[in-house]
Image (cartoon, grey):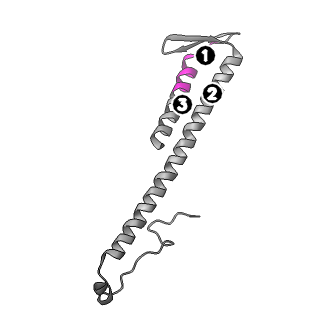
Amino acid sequence: MLLLGLLLLGGAAAFTGLLIADNRSGGPTYSVVLSGHTIATMNALEIFLSGLALALIFCIGLAMTGVGGRLARRRRVTLRRARRLTRRTSGSRSDARTAPAARTRTDRQSRWYLFGH
């Protein structure tokens, strides 16, 4: 999901940049040119609506990137907790009684402190 969101973001931004760079002429109707090829002839309303569609695609890509990042972080945290629990419970009980208590991090203590989290 993260990769697809980044692809949508990059594609919408590149397409918009190319359209702006290639289409600087004015008039009542505009010929939309992309890399030397005329794609369509549009009036002002059609150009406005296509800009809205590109903005919507960009926002969808942005939302997908955010959700994908949060899911990846949640997955990393869950795996880290499972590994920590496995390490704690994998030792035998007799070893745990004789070995000195090892310092373990609690859920509130982490290696990196993120303000507000």
Between the C-alphas of marks 2 and 1, the distance is: 20 Å
In this picture, residue 71 sits left or right of residue 88: right
Q: Quadrant of the C terminus?
A: bottom right
Which mark is drawn over residue 24?
1
Instruction: Name the element at disc 3.
Output: helix
Tell me which segment is drawn in magenta: 15-25
Q: Residues within 10 Å of mark 1 (few under 14, many from 20)?
A: few
Examine the image and state in which quarter residue 28 appears. Answer: top right
Graded by Cα atoms within 10 Å as few (under 14), some (14 to 19) or many (20 or more), the crowding at tag 3 reads some
Q: Is residue 93 left or right of residue 19?
A: left
Instruction: Residue at 46%, 65% (x, y): give it.
Output: 112
Which label is found at residue 13?
A: 3
* Residue 41 rendering spot, x and y as whole percentages: 62, 10
Q: Nearer the viewer, residue 71 or 36?
A: 71
Residue type, numbered disc 2: Ala
> Which residue is identified by label 2?
53
- Residue 24 percent location from the top left of the image: 61, 16
Residue 12, quarter of picture: top right
- The answer to whether residue 82 is above or below residue 61 is below
